[in-house]
Amino acid sequence: MRLRERGDRLLRISDVRLMTAFGRSTIYRKISEGTFPEPIRFSANVVRWRESAIQAWIDGFGSK
């Protein structure tokens, strides 16, 4: 099943920053620590995050 069929948007870093209120370096630091969803890599310079993964992370963050 394709992402659009599931209603799962692919987010740019700017969208992720708005949703989380984290800066770029904080997002990538948390990825390297294993505490933030990893992006999907499309090419050397293009990555996107699944909106559902970011929303699940936000929802889980509030319960800790």
Image: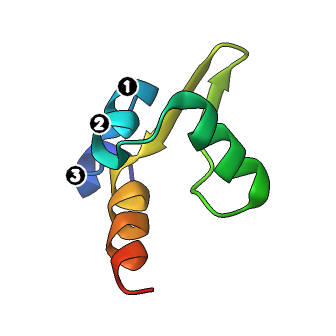
Q: Residue drawn at (36%, 65%), measured in percent from left and top?
A: 58
- Label number found at residue 54: none
Helix, strand or loop at label 3? It is loop
Give the number of callouts: 3
Q: Quadrant of the N terminus?
A: bottom left
Callout 2 secondary element = helix
Separation of marks 3 and 1 at Cα, in angstroms: 20 Å
Q: Amino acid at mark 2?
A: Leu
Above or below residue 26? Residue 53 is below
Q: Position of residue 64 (x, y in %)?
A: 45, 86
Q: Position of residue 16 (x, y in %)?
A: 39, 39
> Sequence order check: which comes first, mark 3 or mark 2?
3
The amino acid on which the numbered mark 3 sits, given as a three-letter code, is Gly
Nearest to the observer: residue 50 or residue 58: 58
Q: Residues within 10 Å of mark 2 (few under 14, many from 20)?
A: few
Residue at 66 percent of width and 52 percent of height: 30
Check disc 1 and report its element: helix, strand or loop.
helix
Q: Are marks 2 and 1 in contact (CB under 8 Å)?
A: yes
Q: Which mark is residue 18?
A: 2
Q: Which mark is residue 7?
A: 3
Q: Residues within 10 Å of mark 1 (few under 14, many from 20)?
A: few
- Look at mark 1 in the image and give the residue it sits on: 14
What is the crowding at mark 3: few (fewer than 14 residues within 10 Å), some, or many (at least 20)? few
* Residue 21, quarter of picture: top left
In the displayed structure, 49 sits above or below 14; it is below
